[in-house]
Image (cartoon, rainbow, N blue to C red):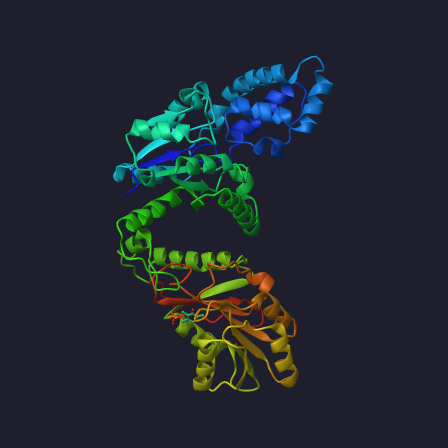
Amino acid sequence: MIEAIILDWAGTTVDYGSRAPIIAFKNAFAHYGVELSETSIRQDIGIDKKSHVRKILQQPEIANNWEAAHPTIPLATATDEVYRQFQHEITQVLSETAQLKSGMTELIQFANDHHIQLATTTGYTQAMLDQLLPLAAEQGYQPLVNITSEQTNHVGRPQPAMVELAMQKLNVTDPAHVIKVGDTINDVLEGKNAGVISVGVVEGGNLIGLSQSEFEQLQIEDRDRYQMKAAAILTEAGADEIVMNIADLIPLIESIDDHQREMPLLLTPGPLTTSPTVKATMQVDHGTWDDDYKALTQWVRHQLVTLGNASDDVYTAVLMQGSGSFGVEATLGTAIPRENATLMIAANGAYGERMAEMATYLQIPFITVHAPEDQPITMDLVSEKLAAHPEVTHFAMVHCETTTGILNPIETIIPALADKGIVTIVDAMSSFGGVPIDLERLNVDYLVTSSNKCVQGVPGSASSSRKKRPWQPLRATHVHWS
Ligand SMILES: *Cc1c(COP(=O)(O)O)cnc(C)c1O
């Protein structure tokens, strides 16, 4: 069971975008007539601030600028001087940037309810921390133990000393029961070096570096790109887990607890283990005509389109009460006319064959193109078959052929067929939500998935994301998301 969470400050629990240290470094160097770019500051963020000043001064371009501006002050003295100025600057900005990030209130409540102790480590000095603590306390955040590198003989991140001291003070000995959370590479390394569960937080972190209003003004695709990039950097640094919002630690902790209690673990493809949050959601009965339920449905539909990196203007998600196969059958049955249409099905495994079986039952005229079960479908195979069958109007294929694990190259085949005016249908049951899929770039007409595979919900509902076409009114579909 998780007994303690050790949290970083700026960019993790307070100060969305980790603005305070950036502004203070900039102002401190500007005081000496040296301009800093944000990138040059962010490289080493998370280490103790004096070492950080030294590192910045060692960057060749900055060292040159410093020497040009202050030929008589050697670099060693410069570190001391700039650091003194930094301390002054940070006290100016700390109070403005001490606001708790969204999700913190939920996390604090959860930790209280579950007797999980909260502690912090930081690259800030004791003096800076002492300024921050009352501001956080006013907002209901009062970690039990707060460590700076002054308490560990100036051994800071990425060394594990601060985490180890925090654990000692909390009287927690098993590192498998401790989570360290932070938004920088040095945070992740600190956790790894301490042998605890090291978690990277993405939203509002240093690696994105934007203020909340800057971030919220971005297009959804750009937000996604920023987040994916930050997540990739933290993963690369060795993070055991990545969360987007800090409140996402709640389901993570619940699933770690389940795992440590050796609850049965169902593996993807689904039905798979659902998180306690998903299970808890099922405890509530919903009236399908109630406004809050309708809003929830719209939210699910929007989230599915967003997961496909698409905009609601171009794609829409149609929810259906049934299994994944139900979704495929419904899509084949409604997207393809029975006359003046020919479907080509590419099959290299059981789910491809199942589509052929469905087409037979539905009396859809179809031809198949086969690849061996241990080979992907290729564009060459498809083109060859198409040349022989110019009557083809619709095309269907499976993305991940779950029965063999072969991942078929939809990224090359689907846009090419769409360009020829062929209506395309993809069964992405066991890939959507697991393998990145860009609906708009794919230009796919219909993509079918289900709730119980990579989306990690309970079985019983399928969704077909479809491209909106101005000349085709959207079918109103009965919706039941269980
Ligand atoms: C699982 C799966 C299906 C069928 O989904 P059910 O919910 O089991 O009916 C169809 N296609 C693929 C590729 C799958 O992995």
The quadrant of the rendered image in which ligand 1 is seen is: bottom left
Quadrant occupied by the N terminus: top left
Q: In x, y percent, where is residue 33?
A: 68, 20
Residue 140 makes an appearance in the image: no
Residue 307 makes an appearance in the image: yes
Q: Quadrant of residue 6?
A: top left
User: Looking at the image, is 316 positioned above or below residue 233?
Assistant: below
Q: Nearer the viewer, residue 302 or 395?
A: 395
Quadrant occupied by the C terminus: bottom left
Q: In x, y percent, where is residue 64?
A: 71, 24
Residue at 30% in and 54% down: 281
Outermost residue on the top side: it is 72
Q: In x, y percent, where is residue 221?
A: 56, 52
User: Looking at the image, is 299 positioned above or below residue 174?
Assistant: below
Q: In x, y percent, where is residue 465?
A: 49, 66
Q: Quadrant of residue 480?
A: bottom left
Residue at 59% in and 73% down: 378
Q: Describe residue 118's horizontal placement relative to residue 394 as left or right.
A: left
